[in-house]
Image (cartoon, rainbow, N blue to C red):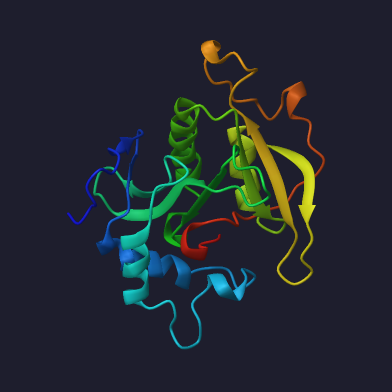
Amino acid sequence: MDRPRGQQEDRFSERLRLRPWVVSDAAFHRRLWAERDPRVPARRRLTADGHPTLAEMEDWLRAYRQEPAPGLLVVERADDRTAIGYCGLVANSVGRPEEPELAYEFLRASWGRGYATEASRVVISLAAAVGYEHLSSTVRAWNTASFAVLRKLGFVDTGERERDAVHGDSVLLRLRLWPDADQSAGPQMIRSDSPAAISSSSGSSNRSNPSGMSA
């Protein structure tokens, strides 16, 4: 295993294993890029001449640091250790460093099986343990599948938008992990049907991902 020393331990859910990236994940990483929706900005898709190349992906993985903690984690099926996607936290894209963004992306063959929701719950628990009070997620307005996942997790629409007539507007959602500054009560994910979860819109697609990754 070509995992750098000092990386965090693996995490498990009922069906999934979440682990740090290793250099040998480069081909899998590149396959995710190859499967991206054509509405995703060109800088986050493979170019006509094949960039990023496998070697470029390997370089990115060697340099990647899991920040903000726990960073982005490869998601595997626990039974056969097949990599099917990634899920984790990335730096906030709208100027709130204390509020990292949840990001995830899965191979098309694994869509519709609840993997994104299951993996995200693991990441949310890790984020609460770190001490974050809120998480964000920035998604394209056309990505209804991501909206469905985020609402299951308790994210609510903030009403904030980044307009983009070419690739689709980006919508900012937020999840409150702690009910107030006193964290002794433990994390509290707000249900999407609760009074605190009144939202103003729908939409979606995770925008901030590794090495320009975006769903």
Q: Residue at x 25, y 49 (%)?
A: 81
Q: Residue at 17% across / 54% down in the picture? A: 1
Q: Position of residue 141 (x, y in %)?
A: 72, 56
Name the quadrant of the C terminus: bottom right
**Outermost residue toward the bottom in this view:** 49
Left or right of 194 on screen, residue 93: left
Where residue 124 sits in the image (x, y, percent)?
A: 50, 33
Q: Is residue 1 left or right of residue 82?
A: left
**Residue drawn at point x = 27 percent, y = 56 percent:** 22
Residue 165: name its quadrant. bottom right
Q: Residue at x 54, y 21 (%)?
A: 187
Image position of 200 (left or right of 77): right
Q: Is residue 75 left or right of residue 116?
A: left
Label count reads 0
Whether residue 155 is visible: no
Q: Where's residue 95, x and y in %?
A: 67, 48
Does 35 sit above or below residue 140?
Answer: below
Picture quarter containing residue 155?
top right
Residue 77's place in the image compared with 34, above or below, is above
**Residue 15 seen in the figure:** yes
Q: Quadrant of residue 148?
A: top right
Whether residue 192 is situated above or below residue 16 in the rendered picture: above
Give residue 14's position: percent from left, percent from top.
35, 33
Residue with the most extreme left position: 1
Q: Nearer the viewer, residue 95 or 19?
A: 95
